[in-house]
Image (spheres, rainbow, N blue to C red):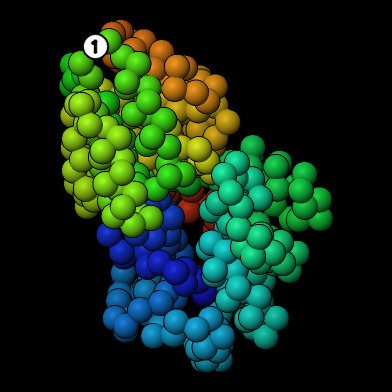
Amino acid sequence: MRICVISQHSSPLDPVGSGKSGGMNIYISHLYKALSRFCEIDIFTCGKKGEVSLGPSNKVIYLDCQELNNFADTVLGYHSSRKYDIIHTHYWLSGIVGLLTSKKMGIPWIHNLHTVEMLKSVRKDQSRINVEEETIRCCNLIISPTTQEAIAIKEIYPDAEVITIPHGVDVHKFTPSLDGHSKLLFVGRIDPIKGLDILIDALKLQEGDIQLDVIGGASKGEDNLEGIKTYARGLRVKFYGPVKHEELNQYYQKASVLVVPSYYESFGLVALEAMASARPVIGFEDTGLLETVGGDAGILVKRNPKNLGWAINHLINNQELCYDLGLRGRKKSISYNWASIAQKYLVTYEEIIKD
């Protein structure tokens, strides 16, 4: 089986935590590394690095084509010789490539939205909504990381074919360590949608002296990052910038609690990494964390700084509860190991080809 994967706007090999690179990059690199035992996989992205091998049957192919029509034509050229069985696109920009290529390829088309513009509570991009609607209408299958999101998509687009397959985590890399720390941890791009401002508001309500470590770089420009730093002035907030993903586990291990204050979070891969590290997670109940973290691996609250502050204070001052939630999270994370998630995708690929 040969899979044509499109991640046009961002390479799975890009350093995560700033710019366009985040959880989706981690997801793509780990999923297809696990699937390469069973499939031949070409991952197409935009860039000038040529071809980079990820293993005997898995490679990233950089296309020096900023213009989407040229990008699509080049993918079609590869298909004429490689004869792919499935095209699998990721994110709305890659959905445009799918719209330009799938009918000409004559093979099944699967799409992961990763974030759904129509479901965001912040200002929406109408041109992106139009592309996502056309992608949902034309592709054979949408894969969503949570049942909650899949149901929401079906409510808006009743004719959509949607199934749920969660993201995974490397449970061998992200492992528990001894407890006893009191620091909070934030991991993510410094982007308004990630809600770092509401976390800072919550810290301003605390009477104790709590330290927050922030891992991640600017996503919406340096002005936004500097604005956040200014907003946090007077608090014990340390900005580390982007950190290599392979080094991230040590930051989870040194923390007591991970806080995910996002205004919108389709899944929350960092929460799963914290769970694998036996660290409880605090976040909001109107996000994808409801399915991963739930009520047994952390505390989810209704969205406002006061509620967030209460949850932080409750866990920081209760090490026994931290330990208990962390242990439950670790046990829960085992079922999200990449080998199991890859098997779900393999079965889906085989069924859609057969049908």
Q: Residue most toward the right?
A: 159
**Vertical order, 78 against 256 (above or below):** below
Q: State the SS at label 1.
A: loop
- The residue drawn where x is 30% and y is 75% is 53
Q: Position of residue 142 (x, y in %)?
A: 65, 57
- The residue drawn where x is 36% and y is 10% is 314
Q: Nearer the viewer, residue 86 or 295?
A: 295
- Quadrant where the C terminus lies? bottom right
Kind of residue indicated by mark 1: Gly
Mark 1 Cα shell of 10 Å, populated few (<14), some (14-19), many (≥20): few
Q: Position of residue 220 (x, y in %)?
A: 38, 55
Q: Position of residue 197 (x, y in %)?
A: 38, 34
Q: Position of residue 99 (x, y in %)?
A: 66, 75
**Vertical order, 217 against 176 (above or below):** below
- Tell me which corner region of the image, top left, top right, bottom left or bottom right, holds residue 41: bottom left
Confirm whether residue 110 shows in the render. no
Residue assigned mark 1: 208
